[in-house]
Amino acid sequence: MIVDCAVYDAGRRVTGDITPEEACRARRGAGPDAFVWIGLYEPTEDEFESVRRAFELHELAVEDAIQAHQRPKLEIYDDTLFIVLKPARYVDDQEEVEFGEIQLFAGAEFLITVRHRPASALGDVRRRMEADPQMLALGPSAVLHAVVDRVVDDYLPVVAGLEKDIHEVEAQVFSASRENPAERIYKLKREVLEFQLASAPLLDPLDRLARRRVAGVSDELTEYFRDVQDHLVRVVEQVASFRELLTSILEANLTQVGVRQNEDMRKISAWVAIVAVPTMIAGIYGMNFRNMPELTWTYGYPAAIGLMLAICVSLWVFFRRSGWL
């Protein structure tokens, strides 16, 4: 569906909510720098048809915009830029990264945003741009920068959320607790990998925009795109470090599990050795042979019990000092 459609001239909104066809006619009647900004949310093929006809969009880009599930990229169809972004937000209680998708068609006289799933709503981006006529007067490329900047800024809370949970699981691995957080580590590693796949491919499109390798982008916005690129580089580097850290944490956890198992086996072996002594002595005296030592001695039974206790206590002290108990 069409969320908003308006014409902007010299940084000012000159129309209310109108159809794409009406926006095209209104733009022709406005100044030479006027442009149309249309926002759509999960449009169907039929709903998008009027937009495609009005702005003569390439059929391959339209297909990508309707079907979604694209990786971040920048493509050029004739005089139109087609950019795919993957906005993200972190659900802390579930320790999951939720992803949306935004496609942008940017031409000299129009900018069209197509959103899929609720991540990174763009209503506040439009309001912020309308409150800054000087920036909005730079045309569709200024709106393009604002949307990309918003998506990259939304990556920062995701990075912070992942970092917090990674520190928690790291402390859990090296705590005195005997919990095994392997499943949590694996899930975090999977979320980090998916986040890296959503953010890292955007580096190349931003590099092209920041280095003026894309026609139709205002030279005045080069520094702004470079700033967004710097933010994204830091995000991608942090995410890469998260992957390495989680791999190390998982290996450390496996080592800790092995150490605890060895400790348990040593304790079990020590107790088995201690219990084996009275079992052996009692077994010998339980064979009921007639000519066995001390069978007729008055103190034979207490002496056997005392011998058992003495050997068991000696073994307990020995294993205690050796760190097995």
Image (cartoon, grey):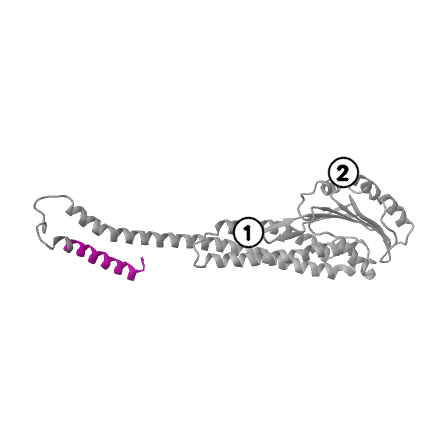
The percent coordinates of residue 240 (x first, y second) are 57, 55
Secondary structure under tag 2 reads: helix
Number of numbered discs overlaid on the protein picture: 2
Q: Name the residue under label 1.
A: 188
Residue drawn at x 55%, y 51% as measured from the top left? 188
Amino acid at circle 1: Leu
Q: Main secondary structure of the magenta part?
A: helix
Tell me: residue 82, above or below residue 324. above
Q: In this view, does 232 lie to the left or right of 218?
A: left
Q: Which one is nearer the viewer's eye here, 89 or 67?
A: 89
CA separation in Å, label 2 and label 1:
36 Å
Q: Is residue 311 magenta?
A: yes
Tell me: residue 321, above or below residue 191. below
Residue 66 visible at all: yes
Q: How crowded is mark 1: few (under 14 residues within 10 Å), some or many (20 or more)?
A: many
Region rendered in magenta: 303-325
Amino acid at circle 2: Glu
The reply to whether discs 2 and 1 touch (Cβ–Cβ < 8 Å) is: no
Residue drawn at x 53%, y 59% as measured from the top left? 167
Q: Is residue 220 magenta?
A: no
Q: Which one is nearer the viewer's eye here, 279 or 37?
A: 279
Residue drawn at x 67%, y 56% as measured from the top left? 154
The percent coordinates of residue 246 (x first, y second) are 52, 54
Residue 217 visible at all: no
> Going from the N terminus, do you reach mark 2 or mark 1 first?
2
The percent coordinates of residue 133 (x first, y second) are 83, 60
Quarter of the rendering occupied by the C terminus = bottom left
Residue drawn at x 85%, y 49% as measured from the top left? 17
Residue, far front: 298
Q: Is residue 194 left or right of residue 228?
A: left
Q: In this view, does 52 lie to the left or right of 262?
A: right
Q: Name the residue under label 2.
A: 45
